[in-house]
């Protein structure tokens, strides 16, 4: 172990998931010498995703092969500021990634564009429902960037990801049976929509019957052979059902490893260093300029990497963590509502219904793909009148049949014992005769949901752990129950023999033992006011102008959709600002 | 080993080198051209060791008489060729004789380089003197035991088998494009080193098409990968490929019929992908101009019997179930693969001969389609050695060798077992 200093580079990137890979590609194209540092190991389709060893639920999902190594580092969790936080020691509720590709290697593939209204959520709600509609404890704010500004980047990200889907409106013209609530697009999807499994067809018919508007989920699971603008290629998805938690063996699911890294490997001004855990973004004596980063390498060396530009692209909440460790920006204080780092942590509010059918109706839930299925957006975003409902936000509803695996198993009717012969019989009777549907809802920020450094627990390097204070609040309970009611209408239209509704009950606390989604956000949010946001509309730190913080950490609220499509578009938007504005004239892109 | 010893030892004299060339200083304006030619000749393939410095040598090459280590050809004055004159350089390239006067092993394809033109040699000399970083890394002694380690018999081999060094001249009636292709293929490209069969004394049976139809008709395995025929012939050659297909293969390692794997990968990555489109097109035109050696082979024609059976749920043919379980997701029930991504098995030249070594080897070891500048995606088929028995593999290889109209032959478990002994998993 030693203290080492590496040769200076133009840009250093912390984390090599989607955001790190996109930034590496964009910045190397701009001629910069770029080093990306990834805390986890090198990973690729082969060997981590190689068939048939990758089709192994025990190794990959149950034993968390591709997820964060909880023996080295984790975060602590508590429900409210007065609680004692304890470490999240066993992965369950959410599954953060590590290693080359990050969570982008083991994600599902649902690839959405945030709705225009959600980007200006405070002004939109105030305009439609009045200023009093937003409670004080919900610190909603606009993002500072419009859908129109992001549109070219949504479009390009879809080209890079090889996304399969059906557009509704392209350049103002209706082009096909897509999502009628969608905003205008400049391009259709690069690949046609995926085929539907039977359960998605049932959902489509039922949703149509009850007057909703079903459409194919945009999926970054390739419906055909595809070559992206970087020359990277994908093969058609085989619906094997091993997307989420796995490195797709078939080169069908978009990932940084499949869709960007092969092109980066061809350029001489890029270097990727795995097993390099960044501990600090270094700043100069003024605290307003980053000079590079310090990381601990595989051998335990403490290495300084000087750079002119620092890109922080770690997993969602780890961006706030790195800012807190590096003492950049003002930590958020829930008692005063002041400070920005750690503010507006947000998540997902997902609720579900399982519909059970007789033995002659086979739904084959083992078939599937992570982004595959049919959704309807009638109750997402602000596509419905919130006035009398008293909550903010919405949820797309869908059958997203991602492949039910043998250990995780599928849903069983209410009242089924959790073990024994009655459980076995229920598994046998229901496994191939069930349709699972979800309302994949928004999670509004709450004054008491935030991130800070834990005063008690440390990780393998002696760093304080990140502390998450998070719970469900009234807005979440109200929305959950509204959504399962609306989705219940679809389920009933399928004429099932039984239904099982899982929705958050008022007062029921956040439960870390059951998986929901890994869609966390906030903590380093974007905005127009430096007292209320950590980064400006270009994701540039208000405090340190040569630091850009990219990822869902910038989301001021949790989206109804999955975050990756919006994360990718924001990263391209930020990269464009760096290339076209910052590099010509380094300094704050928005005057403070 | 024995026949070589006899052949080499049977003549007890050396051949003097009589060529005289004026000293020529390296011309800095030729460095770029020289680099291009060095890439076309794939000098790095042998003279740059894995993870080693460029052109510093040290790559071990297994030969029938022992391990040969490639030499340092950087312009380092002591360890490399920095003190070589142009005359020294051209003599080595064309005649295999070093500045020190000994003859190199014919692993160095100087019999092919014998036909290089003077301007090209001067450009390469300029590149190796001025465009390559000198590396002070001493050459490693070869692991060849005495008496085979004696260099003097190589003079005899050279005298006996290497052609007289004279610059390439287009054959009568050969158009400019085909002539350029011939120059590249027979010369710098030294394609015949692998793709032409060798005699027992290791010399290639033909160094150009003029020497006869065995030229580029397919060679013995290199690292366990047989080199297929590059002639315009059915039954494993390039008859079914258009010139565009051949260009695509060389430039990207993939086309609609097949994909690069095994020993060809380095050739695509280190050499062919850097060639200009017009040179690639010339090579394709030349290869398509080579008449068949195997005149009896029939053109490949797709047969949908196997496809229809699989699509109707019938996997009763021996090997079909293993194909469905292990192969069909990527290569398709129709055997057609996915263009540019997963190679077709139907009609793949590798599956049209009696030699199933590559098919068996790839199933045991896995395969890697390398990325290139214009097709950066690398695709890896994982190894099946741990999950399939010799019988499973023999069955499935027999199935793919004979389905969809393929003209291959069934294989035995013994063939699989023999290849399994040396097959190692493909590198990540």
Image (cartoon, coloured by chain):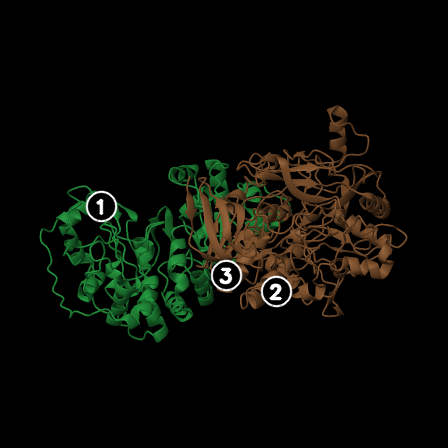
Image quarter of residue B423: top left
Q: Give the mark nearest the N terminus, 2 or 3.
A: 3
The answer to whether mark 2 and mark 1 are in CB contact below 8 A is: no
> 10 Å neighbourhood of mark 1: few (<14), some, or many (≥20)?
some
Q: Looking at the picture, how far across and down is residue B267, in whole percent?
A: 38, 57
Quick one: A180 or B346, which is closer to the camera?
A180
Q: Which residue is mark 3?
A: A28
Image quarter of residue A215: bottom right
> 10 Å neighbourhood of mark 3: few (<14), some, or many (≥20)?
many
* Colour displayed for chain A in the image of the structure: brown
Residue B345 appears in the rendering: no
For the residues labelled 2 and 3, the Cα–Cα distance comes to 21 Å
For the residues labelled 3 and 1, the Cα–Cα distance comes to 43 Å
Seen from this angle, which residue lies furthest right? A388
Q: Position of A509 compared to B384: left or right? A: right
Residue B7 appears in the rendering: yes
Q: Which residue is mark 2?
A: A589
Q: Looking at the picture, how far across and down is residue A93, in whole percent?
A: 69, 39
Q: Looking at the picture, how far across and down is residue B356, in whole percent?
A: 42, 47
Rendered-image quadrant of the N terminus of chain B = top left
């Amino acid at each position: 172990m030693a203290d080492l200093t590496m040769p200076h580079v133009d840009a250093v990137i912390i984390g090599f998931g989607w955001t790190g890979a996109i930034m590496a590609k964009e910045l190397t194209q701009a001629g910069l010498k770029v080093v990306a540092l990834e805390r986890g190991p090198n990973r690729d389709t082969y060997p981590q995703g190689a068939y048939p060893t990758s089709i192994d639920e025990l190794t990959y999902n149950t034993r968390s092969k591709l997820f964060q190594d909880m023996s080295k580092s984790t975060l602590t969790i508590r429900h409210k500021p007065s609680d004692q936080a304890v470490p999240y020691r066993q992965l369950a509720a959410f599954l953060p990634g590590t290693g080359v590709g990050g969570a982008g290697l083991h994600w599902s593939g649902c690839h959405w564009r945030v709705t225009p209204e959600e980007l200006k959520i405070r002004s939109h709600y105030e305009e439609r429902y009045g200023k009093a509609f937003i409670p004080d404890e919900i610190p909603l704010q606009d993002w500072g960037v419009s859908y129109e500004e992001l549109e070219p980047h949504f479009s390009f990200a879809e080209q890079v990801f090889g996304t399969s889907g059906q557009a509704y409106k392209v350049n103002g013209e209706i082009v096909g049976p897509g999502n009628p609530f969608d905003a205008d697009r400049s391009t259709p999807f690069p690949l046609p929509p995926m085929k539907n499994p039977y359960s998605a067809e049932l959902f489509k018919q039922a949703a149509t019957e009850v007057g909703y508007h079903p459409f194919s989920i945009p999926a970054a699971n390739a419906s055909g052979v595809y070559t992206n603008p970087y020359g990277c290629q994908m093969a058609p998805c085989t619906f094997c059902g091993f997307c989420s938690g796995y490195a797709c063996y078939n080169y069908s699911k978009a990932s940084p490893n499949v869709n960007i890294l092969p092109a980066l490997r061809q350029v001489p001004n890029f270097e990727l260093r795995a097993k390099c855990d960044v501990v600090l973004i270094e700043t100069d004596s003024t605290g307003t300029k980053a000079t590079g980063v310090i990381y601990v390498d595989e051998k335990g060396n403490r290495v300084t990497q000087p750079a002119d530009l620092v890109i922080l692209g770690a997993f969602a909440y780890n961006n706030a963590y790195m800012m807190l460790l590096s003492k950049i920006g003002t930590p958020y204080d829930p008692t005063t509502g002041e400070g920005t780092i750690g503010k507006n942590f947000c998540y997902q509010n997902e609720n579900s219904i399982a519909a059970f059918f007789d033995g002659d109706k086979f739904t084959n839930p083992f078939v599937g793909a992570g982004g595959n299925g049919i959704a309807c957006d009638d109750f997402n975003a602000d596509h419905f009148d919130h006035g009398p409902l008293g909550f903010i936000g919405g949820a797309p509803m869908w059958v997203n049949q991602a492949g039910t695996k043998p250990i995780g198993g599928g849903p069983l009717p209410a009242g089924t014992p959790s073990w024994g012969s009655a459980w076995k019989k229920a598994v046998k009777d229901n496994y191939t005769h069930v349709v699972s549907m979800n309302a994949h809802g928004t999670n509004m920020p709450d004054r008491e949901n935030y991130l800070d450094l834990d005063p008690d627990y440390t990780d393998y390097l002696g760093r304080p752990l990140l502390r998450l204070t998070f719970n469900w609040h009234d807005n979440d309970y109200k929305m959950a129950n509204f959504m399962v009611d609306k989705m219940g209408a679809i389920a009933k239209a399928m004429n099932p023999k039984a239904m099982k509704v899982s929705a958050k009950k008022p007062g029921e606390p956040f439960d870390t033992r059951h998986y929901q989604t890994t869609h966390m956000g906030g903590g380093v949010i974007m905005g127009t006011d430096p007292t209320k946001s950590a980064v400006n509309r270009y994701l540039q730190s208000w405090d340190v102008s040569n630091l850009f913080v990219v990822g869902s950490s910038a989301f001021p609220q949790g989206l109804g959709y999955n975050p990756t499509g919006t994360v990718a578009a924001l990263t391209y938007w930020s990269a464009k600002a760096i290339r076209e504005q910052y590099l010509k004239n380094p300094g704050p892109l928005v005057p403070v | 080993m024995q026949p070589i010893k006899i052949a080499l030892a049977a003549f007890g004299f050396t051949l003097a080198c009589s060529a005289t060339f004026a000293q020529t200083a390296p011309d800095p304006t030729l460095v770029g051209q020289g680099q291009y030619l060095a890439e076309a000749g794939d000098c790095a393939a042998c003279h740059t060791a894995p993870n080693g410095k460029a052109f510093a040598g040290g790559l071990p090459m297994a030969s029938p008489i022992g391990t040969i280590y490639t030499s340092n050809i950087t312009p380092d004055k002591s360890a490399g060729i920095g003190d070589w004159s142009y005359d020294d350089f051209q003599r080595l390239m064309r005649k295999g004789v070093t500045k020190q006067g000994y003859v190199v092993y014919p692993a160095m394809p100087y019999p092919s380089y014998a036909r290089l033109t003077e301007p090209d040699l001067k450009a390469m000399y300029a590149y190796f003197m001025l465009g390559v970083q000198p590396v002070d890394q001493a050459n490693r002694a070869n692991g060849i035991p005495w008496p085979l380690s004696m260099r003097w018999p190589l003079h005899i081999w050279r005298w006996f088998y290497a052609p007289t060094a004279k610059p390439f001249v287009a054959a009568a009636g050969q158009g400019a494009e085909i002539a350029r292709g011939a120059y590249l293929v027979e010369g710098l490209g030294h394609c015949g080193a692998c793709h032409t069969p060798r005699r027992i004394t290791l010399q290639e049976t033909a160094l150009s098409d003029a020497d006869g139809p065995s030229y580029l008709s397919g060679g013995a395995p290199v690292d366990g990968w047989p080199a297929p025929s590059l002639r315009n012939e059915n039954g494993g050659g390039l008859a079914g490929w258009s010139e565009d297909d051949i260009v695509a293969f060389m430039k990207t390692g993939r086309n609609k019929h097949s994909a690069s794997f095994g020993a060809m990968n380095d050739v695509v990555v280190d050499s062919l992908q850097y060639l200009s489109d017009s040179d690639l097109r010339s090579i394709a035109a030349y290869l398509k101009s080579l008449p068949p050696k195997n005149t009896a082979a029939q053109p490949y024609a797709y047969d949908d019997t196997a496809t229809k059976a699989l699509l109707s749920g019938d996997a009763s043919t021996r090997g079909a179930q293993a194909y469905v379980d292990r192969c069909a997701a990527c290569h398709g029930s129709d055997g057609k693969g996915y263009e540019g991504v997963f190679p077709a098995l139907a009609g793949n030249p590798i599956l049209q001969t009696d030699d199933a070594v590559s098919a068996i080897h790839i199933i045991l070891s896995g395969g890697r389609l390398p990325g290139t500048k214009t097709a950066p995606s690398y695709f890896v088929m994982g190894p099946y050695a741990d999950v399939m028995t010799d019988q499973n593999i023999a069955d499935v290889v027999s199935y793919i060798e004979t389905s969809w109209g393929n003209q291959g032959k069934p294989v035995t478990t013994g063939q699989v077992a023999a290849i399994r002994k040396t097959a190692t998993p493909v590198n990540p």
